[in-house]
Structures are given as C-alpha cells and as structure tokens.
Amino acid sequence: MFSTAFLDLPPLAGAAGSVQLPGSKSISNRVLLLAALSQGTTEVRDLLASDDTRVMLDALRQLGCGVEESGGGTVRITGLGSPHGARPRSPASLFMGNAGTAMRPLTAALALLGGEYELSGVPRMHERPIGDLVDALRQLGCRIDYLGNDGFPPLRIAHAAGVPPLQLAAPIRVRGDVSSQFLTALLMALPLAARQHDVVIEVVGELISKPYIRITLELLARFGIAVRHERWQRFTIPAGSSFQSPGLIHVEADASSASYFIAAGAIAAGATGQDGIKILGVGLDSIQGDIRFVEAAQAMGARITGGPNWLHIARGQWPLQAIDLDCNHIPDAAMTLAVMALYAQGTTVLRNIASWRVKETDRIAAMAAELRKLGATVKEGLDFIAVTPPASAADWRAAHIHTYDDHRVAMCFSLAAFNPAGLPVRIEDPQCVAKTFPDYFEALFQVAQAQAGSIPVICIDGPTASGKGTVAAAVARALGYHLLDSGALYRITALAASRAGLQIGPADEPRIAELARQLPVRFEGARVWLGDDEVTAAIRTEEAGMNASQVSALPAVRAALLALQHSFRRLPGLVADGRDMGTVIFPQAPLKIFLTASAECRAERRHRQLLSNGVSANIADLRAQLEARDARDSSRSVAPLKPAHDALVLDNSERTIDEIVAQVIAWWQARQPFGA
Ligand code: DC
C-alpha cells in the first residue's frame, strides 16, 4: 500500500497481463454470516481482507463460531447451526466498527436467535440509521432497546429467556427506500423463523439498490434458501427453510474494482489482440450489479470476452466512442466511465446519478472539478455529468488530483496517466484506496507499461559515509519509489567472490564478473539475501566495504552489473544511490544529487554508527580508511567517483539528514509540471 502524501504516476504507454482482484465486500460479509448460521463447516476462499470483514470475523468468534484463518483469503467457518437450532454464546458485547454490512444483518440474526447482546460501533456508526430494521423486528415481537439515540446504534437485544413467540402471520413490512441493507438483514435472518410457515416480507416504498438484493438472494440460494419475490416488493421465504452449507464457496472478486482494469484494457495501446488485460476472479456469471459496466465499456469501444469468472479486455474502437447512458444500475462503476470519456470522441453524458452526491463525497462535484484540471470541459447537473475531452493532446494538463478521501476518485483518475500528451498525474492521499483495494496501485503497476525513459529516477551519488544511503531511502519512502542501493551490489559481489574462493583483484576478474552477471540477490526492505542466505550484516562490515571497492574497480564487473541495476527502474519511480548513478547508469535521470561532506565529518559519523552497533573503532584510522577508499573510487579508470556535469552538489557537513531530505524533495517538486 502507498501511504505517501501523494503518488506521481508517470505517463503510461500501454498495459497487458493479468490481475487478480480482491474479493467483493458485499459478498464477503454475507457469506460469513450465512456460514455462521449453517450447520457444519464452510470453507470460504478469496475472502476480502478489510476492516469490515475483520469486524465480522471477530464478532462470529465471540458468538462461538469456529473461525480458522489459513492465510491467502481462506477461512473455515464452523457454523452455530445444529439439529436443535443455532445457539450463539450469550451474553456478548459486539463491536461493529463502521461496518454496516455486519451491524444490520447481525442485529436481525441475533434478535431471532435469542440471548442478550449489545452491538456498538465507532462514533460514525452511531450516526447511521437502523430504526427501520428495528421497527420491523419489533413488529415481530423482538425486544430491542436503543442504548443511545432512538433509531441508531448502539443497541441491546434482550432475549435472556429466549425469543418470545414471533408474529409471523401477517407480512413483515420494511422500508426499502433508505437502505437496502435492512431488507438484506431480514432476508438473511428470517429463514431461522420459517420452519413451520412461509414468512412474507413486504417492502414499503420503492426499493433502491436492487442489485444488492439480488446478491443477497443469490447467496441465500447457495445456502439452500430459495426466496421467491414478486416485482421486488413482496418476498416469500418458504416453510421448511434451513441453512445448508455448500461446503466450499468462493468469494467473487469485486466487480466495481474490475472497472479500472476494464477501462485500462480499453484505453491502453498495446492491449490489443491476445495481449490485453485478463482479470481473474470475476466474470460474466458475476452476481454483482456492477458487472454490467462491461456493457457500458463495450459501448464505448472496448473488446471484451469472458468466462464465468474471468474477463479479457483489449482495445477495440479507438478513439473511444462517447455514450449517453442512464447509470442508475452501475452507480459506482460509472465513475470510471467519466474518466474513459477523456479518451472518447464527442461528449459523454452519464445520467441518473443523483446518488453520487451523497456518497463518500459529492462525487459529481468532485469528478467535475478534477476532470477540468486535466483539460476536459465538464457540465454538471443535479443528477448528471457531461464530459468533453481536451480538444487535442496539446490541451491536456498535468494535474494533481485531489481525492476527497474517496477510494473511487483515486482509482479512476489513475487512468488519466494514459493521456496522449505523455504527462504525469499526481494522485493525492493514495492510501484512501484501502477502503476496498489496499494494493490497487501495485496491481496497476503490474499490468501498466511505461516507456523506460519516462519512469523517473533520482540519483544520489557521493563518497562513502556521506549519508547518501539514508537520504536515498528517506526520499524513496516519501515518494513511494523503489530504491537501488548499488553499493550493496558491489558488496554482495565481493562477498560471493570470496565465498567462492576467488581472489578479489584483476587476476580473477572474468570469474567475478560471471558471478556478478548471475547474482541471485534479493532485497526486502533493509534486508538482503544472496540465494537462501541472509547477508544483511555480512556485507556491512568495513572489510566488506573495502572488498567492494576493489571489485568495483574491475571494468568487467561493472559491465556485468549494468542490466541488474537498470532492472530497478520500475513504476512508479526509482531513487538510486551509489557512485556513478548520475554519470554512467542513469545519465538521463531528471534529478541528480551529489552528496558530500568533509572527511572529518564522515569519519565521525562512521565512528558513531560503529559504536552504536557495539563495534569499537579509532576515528583517525577510520578517516584514513575512507580517504583511501575515496582515492581508489575517484581515480579508477572506469566510472570514477565524481559529480555528473548536471548534478546538484549538496554538502551535508553542517546539516541534518532531515534537512537534506527536505532539500532533495523540494528540488524534485520544483521540477514537476503540476500546477498549484
Ligand atoms: O556505497 P557503498 O559504501 O556501499 O559502496 C561500496 C563500494 O562499492 C564503494 O567503495 C565503491 C563501490 N561502488 C561503486 O563503484 N559504484 C557504485 N555505484 C556504488 C558503489
């Protein structure tokens, strides 16, 4: 996950490959509850890992369900059901966080199962209505009290002596025009009361969000409950219903999340023919309403094929075709269409999207404002948005996209990085995607391709102990970029050579170069592996530094490490530190820093560093050693240590690391094209 203040996406040229998307939140929590109400064990695969599913799993554990998490999204739930009915552990006090998909259905289920429970959540949860559901349950005879404000959590279910006789003769009436979750909660809980007689639910008012009720009915069917309905107004749970575990159930990937990759496939050059983008985990048999985004993308020109649980997307018509569409059936995924409109001929009009105004943010206003920053002409109304793309490539603007703490704004605007003008796009607060897709940008970078030259590299070169490693790591962290510690590669090569019994010098140059060319090296944060061996500490000794300096003077070794160093230049960017990053390895890098400090100052720092690692040393010796190393590094014939002609020289003898890092980032910012 990117937890930086902003993430700069370099211009993207193409996209191809496959992506596995995270599980659907709506399906995940429904499946968990249904498994909990069943008898026996259900293995749930591909469960979404998020705050909301965590809350549900914790609650089920507290209620006495068996919950066995085996990693990789697989959870085995042993349900509460038994031939004599389900018996959750009571009394219990359950914390629901901000998960509406846990709060509402658990309230209904526990009210019908009996026992004493308190259900509460975060302050925002105590502002989210639940009165219509409580009213419906009270009609049945359930005893539910409000512990705070009437109509809102926290709640107490007070059935210490068991569930009172339920009033099931008349239809249960529930409002359908506030939240479809009330109806979902009743549909999932009332089969518990439908042993002898049919149970009928009547919706009062127009039912909103029918696609979500469809998901509920589909999942109930997989757990053996066949609900009938008449025009989405009257639902009948047949007598004799009981929850039957399907044994194994897969959670579909999130169809709304799929929309970004469908769009990328439709937009990105290179995504043609067999190449294109393959989405795994959700497909044409999806039970999620947003799968109909596929039709809208096809109407704009995407070429889409698919199977039950996969989709393949390639560029079809180009430029895309503008559409005029009622988006009521795909409110979330439709935001992606507004960004696809940037690549269409004509004006795209998305209608019947009034619900956008009351989501995570006012999405109509947000989309309009951010699309305009990119150069589009946008008209907005109470319930529509009309987007006309920039007239030509020259009319696109490099924009910093404000994301309004709205995961979908962040994800859909990443698609602007495919712009024909070759401009980067800045996404502010990229971690807001965690709501539904924590690794969204990683997934995007897995399929997106950039021209190598357009992936930014910041070079930080300098002599030993100048602080460049620390500065480079901090800059990489702040920007969300990859890090190349090229000195480590020479250190590892020297270590591998001495372990192989080679002489660290010209005599064994070809054999050391051979080792370097196939170096089985792996970095994980600050840790380093050579094959299966962790060598993090072994390469940091003074001796290892000296040996590295020796092997680095061998031209064949330097040549052998070239390709490996270039391979670190990956999306979204790279910070590279060493001696010749700016002069030899990345001569076209857009920012080069040469970091230096007086020998005295560097010797003192190295001394402190050694002491803190419990190694005693003498400052004068250290200074002599590092001056000797500098002399060798600077005087060698290949890639000698020196500032690139276009490097900015920064002397940090008198400055703290934080000041240096701030200076490098300020220089970097000043070179970006984003307006204020
Ligand atoms: O930065 P460091 O101390 O880990 O580097 C160890 C040695 O590797 C250094 O003395 C010279 C060599 N080196 C190099 O020649 N070129 C680089 N880009 C990085 C390091």
Image (cartoon, helix red, strand yellow):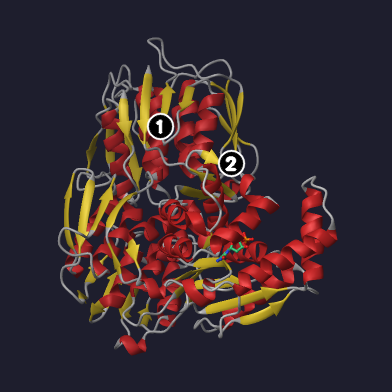
The three-letter amino acid code for the residue at tag 2 is Pro
- Disc 2, disc 1: CB below 8 Å? no
Residue 476 visible in the displayed image = yes
Q: Residue at x 31, y 72 (%)?
A: 13
Residue underneath mark 1:
74
The answer to whether the residue bearing label 1 lies less than 8 angstroms from the nearest atom of ligand 1 is: no
Q: Is residue 541 above or below residue 470?
A: above
| Labelled disc at residue 153 | 2
Q: Residue at x 58, y 69 (%)?
A: 579
Residue 5 visible in the displayed image = no
Taking the image as shown, residue 44 lies to the left or right of residue 639, namely left
In the rendered image, the quadrant that contains the C terminus is: bottom right
Pick the residue in front: 192 or 349.
349
Local crowd size for mark 1, using a 10 Å CA cut-off: few (<14), some (14–19), many (≥20): some
Q: Residue at x 50, y 56 (%)?
A: 507
Pick the residue in front: 662 or 113.
662
The answer to whether the residue bearing label 2 lies less than 8 angstroms from the nearest atom of ligand 1 is: no
The three-letter amino acid code for the residue at tag 1 is Thr
Q: Is residue 375 above or below residue 566?
A: below
Figure quadrant, ligand 1: bottom right
Location of residue 260 (image quadrant): bottom left
* Image spot of residue 610 (x, y percent): 78, 52
Q: Residue at x 37, y 84 (%)?
A: 396
